[in-house]
Amino acid sequence: MSYPRENASPASASPLAGITVIDLGQYIAGPGATMALAELGATVIKIEPLTGDQARHVGRYGEAMVRAYNRGKRSIALDLKSESGREIAWRLIAQCDVVVQNLRPGAVDKLGLGPAQVRARHPRVIYLSISGFGGGGPSSERSGYDIAAQAESGLMFVTGEADRPPQKVGVPIVDAAAADLGAQAILAALYGRECSGVGETLEVSLLETALHLQAATWCDYLGGGPEPTRIGHGQPHNAPAAEVVATLDGHIVLSAYAEDHWKRFCRAVGREALVHDPRFCSNAQRVAHRAELRQVLDECLSAYTSEAAVALLSQHQIVAGAVRRYRDVLTNADVIASGILVEAASDDGGGYRALGLPYRLGDGRRPAPAAAPACGADGAELLAGLGYSPDEVAALREAGVVA
């Protein structure tokens, strides 16, 4: 059963129209997965505790999480520890296609709303759980956040400068990637259900996601390569590759390690003699003399602004990019032209700018779901849709079952 919003996206951009999703998630990974489905046209009903998603209570960045990962959803706040609250949840689940949760290990099972319990009653339901460390190992009961997965997957060990402590990636990239992989798994299961008529139990862990993000590095190591370590910028086996180079007004990053690219770089900066310099005449030599190479790169580009350096190298088909502050990203012509910045409108006339889908479907405009709902904002309407009378809704509120 679907609960359409007035500002739903056009049908051409809504391949999941008619699909209903129950979101039991908190913070980023679970809500991010369901919001991806909302952007594709699904109706997403967020079941929150009476006090709301925990992200609503962890300061400014938590508020940003709510805005970023809950657009286009409807919210109902329930006391799932009460029998009446669970009954409402079961009625919602009976009308849904997908359930997503990333609560602490064991929490949904204790509530009687775990994947085995739900799918025993509703075999067509697709149930996704996102956990820190997966369900099969000794850490299955551990709470897992993005930062723990970064640490235990090796990602932090290879991030940072060689002579400094390990560093996390600057954003919760594992949480965000788990959200996307979770949505991918759900889409695959929805397609499979079209053939089998039966749903699926799905699991994504932050640890496996963090490993997945390092696939090439792990394949090199598993194939007998040296254990990777921190080197700051650059790549361990290629040069110049992902090198950060100072410019007149900032920094750029560039890669020109293929021999033809290196020759083009030398021509572009008017230093063709470097092609035959024994320190730089092959990738292996450039790797061996990386310190001298970086000094040469600085000499070649320090008189250019970042924009001029990128323009020059791009003319010669050299991969390069200006290192931009957030404020500069907003004025970047390519970002503006992409249309990824969307306006999330709210019923009260407010709203905020946010990031839309990172891809397009056809030639239509990128979907722009409504702003994230307030906690429990749609409770009365959803309860009415389930057959509860106004008096029953009032009684549920009085009893503290519904916020």
Image: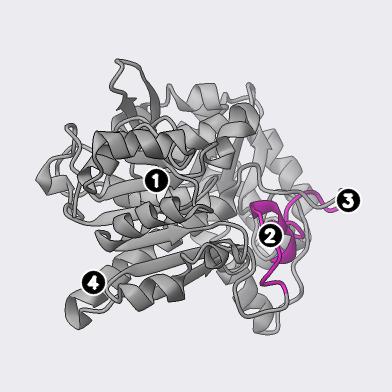
- Could you say which disc has been placed on residue 143 in the image? 2
Q: Which secondary structure lies at badge 2?
A: loop
Q: Residues within 10 Å of mark 2 (few under 14, many from 20)?
A: few
Identify the main secondary structure in magenta: loop
Query: On the picture, is 219 further left or further right than 224?
Result: left
User: In percent of the image, x 76 and y 75: which residue is there?
Assistant: 226
Measured Cα–Cα span from mark 2 to mark 3: 31 Å
Q: Which secondary structure lies at badge 4?
A: helix
Measured Cα–Cα span from mark 2 to mark 1: 22 Å
User: In percent of the image, x 49 and y 36: which residue is there?
Assistant: 66
Q: Residues within 10 Å of mark 3 (few under 14, many from 20)?
A: few
Q: Which secondary structure lies at badge 1?
A: strand
User: In percent of the image, x 65 and y 57: which residue is there?
Assistant: 239
Task: Identify the residue position indicated by label 4 in the image.
Answer: 191
Query: On the picture, is 76 further left or further right than 249?
Result: left
Q: Which secondary structure lies at badge 3?
A: loop
- Quarter holding the C terminus is top left
Q: Is 51 located above or below residue 225 in the figure?
A: above
In reply to whether residue 362 is colored magenta, the answer given is no
